[in-house]
Image (spheres, rainbow, N blue to C red):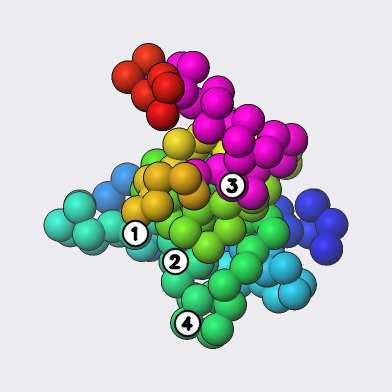
Amino acid sequence: MKTADLVALARQAQELAYAPYSQYRVGAALLTTGGQIYTGANIENASYGLTVCAERTAVFKAVLAGERNFQAIALTGSEAGYTNPCGACLQVLAEFSPAIKIITANGKNEIKEYYLSEMLPYVFSIDQDDWCSEAPGASNEEQVLAFNQDNPSRRGK
Ligand SMILES: [Zn+2]
């Protein structure tokens, strides 16, 4: 699956967004490690807090189809800029695939790519030694060391 193809599927899903309140339509295309694709779009509600983002609709569809491992998710949204995942969606993605690649495209289909660990380096986890354990480029011990250096209250732990 080429990145541009995944972005195109996200763009198609964006057309299905239900966004009568914000008019901000977002599409997502989630690629599993097995090569399956699940799309999503944001679904708003008159009670705004009940709105669900495109990323989470895609993840929830995939999980209900038995999928648990994802390699990439593409996002499309604003014509002017790039649409990044919100913190809630990053946390949901981290539940299943902490090393997932996040691809965002602007209205010109220019692309930026990140790893989840770059956008959410300190994932909430019941097991505090779990965060970023699959992040590229650094071992878990290196990341724990870096976290402790950045957080004086944790030094020596
Ligand atoms: Zn979100």
The mark found on residue 57 in the picture is 2
Residue occupying image coordinates x 59% and y 47%: 133
The amino acid pointed to by label 2 is: Thr
Q: Residue at x 49, y 49 (%)?
A: 130
> Which element type, helix, strand or loop, lies under badge 1?
loop
Across and down, in percent, residue 45 comes to 23, 60
Q: Of label 2 and label 4, which has the lower sequence position?
A: 2
- Residue type at mark 4 is Leu
Q: Position of residue 35 (x, y in %)?
A: 76, 72
Label 3 or label 4, whichever lies nearer to me, is 3
Secondary element at tag 3: loop
CA gap, disc 3 to disc 2?
25 Å
Query: In the image, which residues are magenta?
Result: 131-151
Residue 4 in view: yes
**Disc sitting over residue 64 in the figure:** 4
According to the picture, the residue beneath numbered tag 1 turns out to be: 52
Indicate which disc residue 133 carries.
Answer: 3
Report the residue at 34% width, 59% height from top.
Answer: 52
Q: Is residue 115 visible?
A: no
- Whether the residue under disc 1 has CB within 8 Å of ligand 1: yes
The numbered mark at residue 99 is none
* Dot 1 amino acid type: Val
Quarter assignment of residue 107? top right
Task: Kindly indicate whether the residue at mark 1 contacts the one at mark 2 (C-beta within 8 angstroms).
Answer: yes
Residue 43 in the image: state x and y as whole percent: 36, 62
Would residue 149 be found to the left or right of residue 9 on screen? left
Q: Is residue 47 left or right of residue 150?
A: left
